[in-house]
Each structure stands twice: as structure tokens, then as C-alpha cells.
Amino acid sequence: MEQYQVEWLSLIRYQLESARAQMRQPPPLNALSLSSAHDAVESMMGLCIEVHKVDVKDKATFMELFNAVDKAVPENAKLGGHRTGLKALNADRVNFKHSGSRPSASTIERHLANATSFLEAASEAALSTRLDEVSLVHLVADQEVREALQAAQNDWNSSRAMEAFQGLWIAYDLLIGNYAYKESYDPGGNSFSTRPAFAPNTWGVRSEGKSMEMAYRWLENVDSWIVMSTMGIDPRKYAYFRYHVPPGSRSMSGEVRFQKLQHQKFTQEIFGACFQFVVEAALTLYKKEFAYDAWAARRPGDGGV
């Protein structure tokens, strides 16, 4: 596939993850997952049609697109078996969109399961790609963060679970640090943090005794929550991330040391949720990018003093 098609497939997986998150919301919000799942399926059909250069008429219906994709893939792919489930999804999505009619929670779950099954089958049959291996890193604007996320994913795929989770911390740390540096009004400062510019180092604090060290850790913890909240990152997902990902600290040389978590668990579900959190945090931040160059603003002739 072309690069833009790879990114298109990443967006489809992201649409599916968004639909799953919406499904877990209480009624009536869970009904929004119908539209998201439907969009993901329709987008997959469009991608498959483009990749295989299938001729379809203008303004083809949802099911006509499905039939075109079904004919384009090998018969042993058996995409035709998804026709009934997708037809039901389309009907309930139309009823919800045009009349506000909401199916039950169990029906919504069934539609999501059918949509997921089709997306997985179509991705493998028409695009020769497993959907669960499609990376979301293409959606991240920051190159350093993108590379760190890809490294974490590679570690996970290679069964290096600890390194993978540590890689997620590195990616998140880069994301927050790079964004704060880029969006600061004060050159070299951090507009989002309450931490003073010349805060004492850890070793200096430890020399003042255990109580001072604990108080300092408390303040650092509070500051991290302030940074997260002022940047608009979801605090509940951040709490989940902090619980499951071992925290690290950077030395002046850039070396990262990690603390060990007593409750550390390595599962696909946890890694996927934490990976998704970093991606969503990146998307949230760069929606709000205001591109103020604090360094340029200080230079004579560039609007500075």
C-alpha cells in the first residue's frame, strides 16, 4: 500500500477503538458507537475498493460497497458471511441517525462485534494486514514520540514486555516535554508546570531527611497532575497509565532510570490501553497547538525586544 493508505488504515483502527470506547459509555451515549463503527466499516470498504481498483457506481449504497469488496477478494476469504450482520448495523445506524431510535446495549455490543469481525477479516483478506498489528503511530505528529512508540511496539511484538512498558513512559515523557518546550511563553521555561526553574535535585533533597524527600515527591506528583490537567489530557486515563507503566526519571545526561512496580502486569489489554492513551494524548495536544516561538520573540527584529 501507499503511505497515505497505510495512514488511512491506521485511522480505521483508531475509529474502531473509539467506537469500543463509546460502547462502554452509559445509555444513551453508548448509541454513538453505532455511527463510529459504521464509519470504520465504510472507510475500510473504501480503502479496499481503492487498493484493488474496483469499479463502483457514484453514490453507491452501503451494501453495494460491501458487495463490491466481497467480489474483489478471494472466495476463501468468505466476507459474504458478514453481510447479514453489517446490514443490521446499517439499519440500526439509520434509525438512530434519522429518528433517534436506540437499540439495546446488548444489540449495540453485537453490532460492534460484527463490525470488528468484518474489519479484521477484510484487512487480512484485501490488504494482507492483520488489523491488530496496524500501528497507530502514524497519527502522532511529533517524530521523536512516534519513534519511541514504534520502539515500544516492536519490543512488545518481540516479547520484551518490560522494555515495551518502559518505552511507553519514554514516549509520554517526550510528548509532554517537547510540547511544553514548544508551547512555552518563556524561553527554556514551562508554561504548564508549577516547578521552579532552579528546583533542588533529588540528592540534595535526600540530604535533608526522609520527611523532606517524601514531601518533595508529593509536590512532584501534584505538579505532574497539574501539567496533565492544564494540557487537557484525560485524568482518568492518565491515572490508569500511571498505575500500569513503571515511572522513570531522567538524569542530566539524559539517562532514564525506572522504578519497579510491585503490581506490574504484562497483558495485551493493558499495553494496548496505555499505548492508546499516549496516542490520544498526542492528538489532544496537537489539536491545541498555538505555535508560539518564545525564542524568536526575544530576538531583535523578530517581534522581540
Image (cartoon, helix red, strand yellow):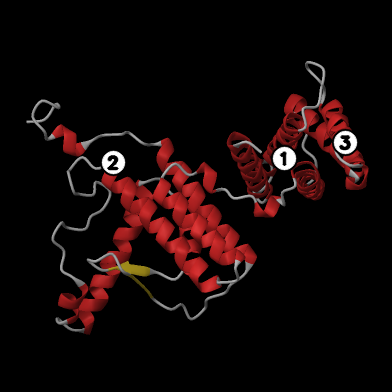
Q: Are marks 1 and 3 in contact (CB under 8 Å)?
A: no
Judge the density around disc 1: few (<14), some (14-19), many (≥20) Cα neighbours within 10 Å: many
Secondary structure state at the residue bearing disc 3: helix
| Label disc, if present, on residue 183 of the rendered structure | 2
Question: In this image, 39 relative to 210: left or right?
Answer: right
Mark 1 belongs to which amino acid?
A: Ala
Could you say which quadrant of the image residue 216 lies in? bottom left
Check residue 70 in the rendering and tell me which mark sits there, or answer none.
Answer: 3
Nearest to the eye among marks 1 and 2: give it: 2
273 on left or right of 185: right
Give the image location of residue 70, x and y in percent: 87, 36
In front here: 137 or 22? 137
Instruction: Report helix, strand or loop for mark 1.
Output: helix
Q: Is residue 116 above or below residue 293?
A: below
Distance from disc 1 to disc 2, alpha carbons, whole Å, reads 35 Å
How far apart in space, not on screen, are marks 1 and 3 (Cα)? Answer: 19 Å
Between 52 and 130, the residue placed more toward the observer is 52
| Sequence-first disc among 3 and 2 | 3
Which residue shows up at 42% across the image and 56% down it?
A: 172
User: How dense is the environment of label 2, judged by Cα within 10 Å: few (below 14), some, or many (20 and up)?
Assistant: many
Closer mark to the observer between disc 3 and disc 2: 3
